[in-house]
Image (cartoon, rainbow, N blue to C red):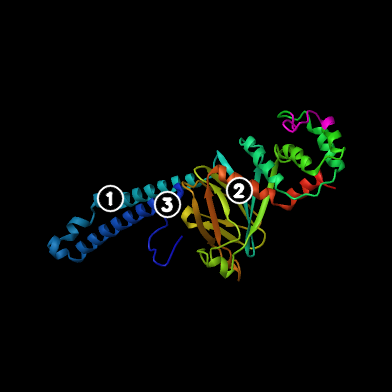
Amino acid sequence: MGSWSKLWFFDMNTVVGQELILYNDLVMVVAVAVLVVVGWFMLLFLNSRTFFGGKMNKYVYHNELLEIMWTMVPAFMLCFLGYVSLMNLYIMEVGDHVENGMKVTAHQWYWEYSYIVDFSSKEKEMDELWLSNWFEQLDFNFEISPELVEVVEEGVGLEGGDLFEGVGVKDGDCLLSVLTSGVEELKLLEMVSSWVPHVFLNCKWNYSYEVYEVFNSSVLDQGNFRGYTVTDACYLMSSVKNEMLISTMDVMHSWGVGSLGVKCDAVPGRVNSLGISPLRSGVFYGNCYELCGEGHSMMPISVAVMTLEDVSLVLKQGVLGTSDCVSTLEGVIMK
């Protein structure tokens, strides 16, 4: 993040950002070289009596080699800079092998982030464990509902084995008889917690949340940055390619983070794509870079770059805290 005492570029966290800095250095070298050469020629022409003895016309006029040089050398420099710039544009493209996809929607004056959270991922056994632990910590007043009976009857035979294995019940009929025989709530919790993960696994959830700037002084006094503290972060995976689809619901905005070397306009009526491949984990800050109204300064961006496993866990925990998830669970378990 930039500060008042920082006079140089950001410490870039992406290959794109590093390439842009190198391109800037290259352009500066070429510009300095051109200025030196042009300045040298101007010095020669202004002091022709000293350098050429008053006979400069003899060496300059009708000099075909000189004309070829001052035409071809600038053309070669421009072609070289254009080639490097074109390569940088290709690096910025999203391309294939995207590991994490998300959507960014701009509003006046806040951001909205949307993810597709896949519970049928490689960490299925781990998901089953912490989903069961999460369910056991919930405070439910249980009553047997027809939906629960239906889920129990259909539970046996699903892919992945017996859902009720390990709780002392071997088939749906036995569990159904246990549920309708006045079993204690604690015992019911133990049994239900074993198959609750399957309500969430093997499916995908759309997880969306809105992000606003935090103005609470007590929060800012805890070491947070004033003007950059937000209610939640945008989560990206490190060392993999992340694709962001950026759009707006009202006026034109621009999503950008300097340390990641990215900036993309949110234009009404269209969706722009942006590829980001962070090199290391950390928290990075940005702003809306398009004047979008009186609340333009109240749209800071906070990006949390973490490992693939950590981002997956954070998003799945976020799904479990949404009203849709709770209502789905209550619709299955409770009346």
Q: Secondary structure at mark 2?
A: helix
Q: Is residue 60 left or right of residue 331?
A: left
Image coords of residue 164 (percent x, y): 75, 32
* Disc 2 crowd, CA 10 A, few/some/many (<14, 14-19, 20+): few
Residue 23: image x %, image y %? 39, 51
Rendered image quadrant of residue 294: bottom right
Say which mark, if any, is on residue 69: 1
Q: Is 178 in the magenta?
A: no
The alpha-carbon separation of the residues under discs 1 and 3 comes to 30 Å
Mark 2: which amino acid? Val
Horizontal side of 300 relative to 331 (left or right) equals left
Q: Is residue 165 magenta?
A: yes
Query: Which of 39/276 is in front?
Result: 276
Work out how far the residue at label 3 is from the one at label 2, CA to CA, in angstroms: 32 Å
The answer to whether residue 170 is left or right of residue 232 is: right
Residue 99 position within the rendered picture, expressed as x and y whole percent measured from the top left = 57, 41
Residue wearing tag 3: 20
Q: Nearer the viewer, residue 147 or 36?
A: 147
What's under tag 3, amino acid-wise?
Leu
Q: Earlier in the sequence, mark 1 or mark 2?
A: 1
Q: Which residue is mark 2?
A: 314
Q: Which residues are magenta?
A: 162-174
Towards the viewer: 150 or 233: 150
Instruction: Give the quadrant of residue 107.
Output: bottom right
Label 1 to label 2: alpha-carbon separation: 61 Å
Pick whichever of labels 1 and 3 is earlier in the sequence. 3
At 61% from the left and 57% from the top, the residue drawn is 267
- Element type at mark 1: helix
User: Is residue 141 depicted above or below 291 in this figure?
Assistant: above
The numbered mark, 3 or 2, whose residue comes first in the sequence reads 3
Q: Residue at x 74, y 37 (%)?
A: 195
